Amino acid sequence: MFYRMWTTKSEYTDPGIDYYEKKYHASILKNLQHKAHAMGLELVPLNPDMPQTPSSPTLAT
């Protein structure tokens, strides 16, 4: 196991879970955009004002 020695005497500050979640989601989005581009497609963000409808038909009861 490799341990990195601190080269400065400054205290470590954890950026928090939000930082890592944003970084993870950005990585996922970049990967999807790359895959879509390779297939000749483009990712388009959803409009949050539009009502969400299912992609497949459903039976109303």
Image (cartoon, helix red, strand yellow):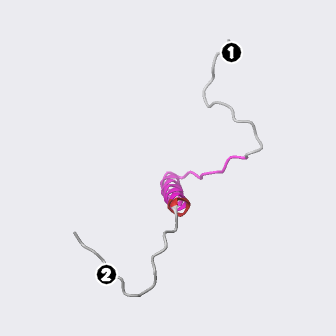
Comparing labels 1 and 2, the label whose residue is closer to the camera = 2
Crowd around label 2: few <14 · some 14–19 · many ≥20 (10 Å): few
Q: Which residue is mark 1?
A: 60
For image coordinates 68% across by 12% down, the residue present is 61
Image coords of residue 44 (percent x, y):
64, 51
For image coordinates 54% across by 63% down, the residue present is 19
In the foreground, 59 or 17: 17
Label 1 sits on what residue type?
A: Ala
Label 2 sits on what residue type?
A: Met
**SS for tag 1?**
loop
Which residue lies most toward the right here? Answer: 49
Q: Which residue is mark 2?
A: 5
Q: CA distance from mark 1 to mark 2?
A: 63 Å
In the foreground, 41 or 33: 33
In magenta, the rendered stretch is: 21-47
Image coords of residue 25 (percent x, y):
53, 56
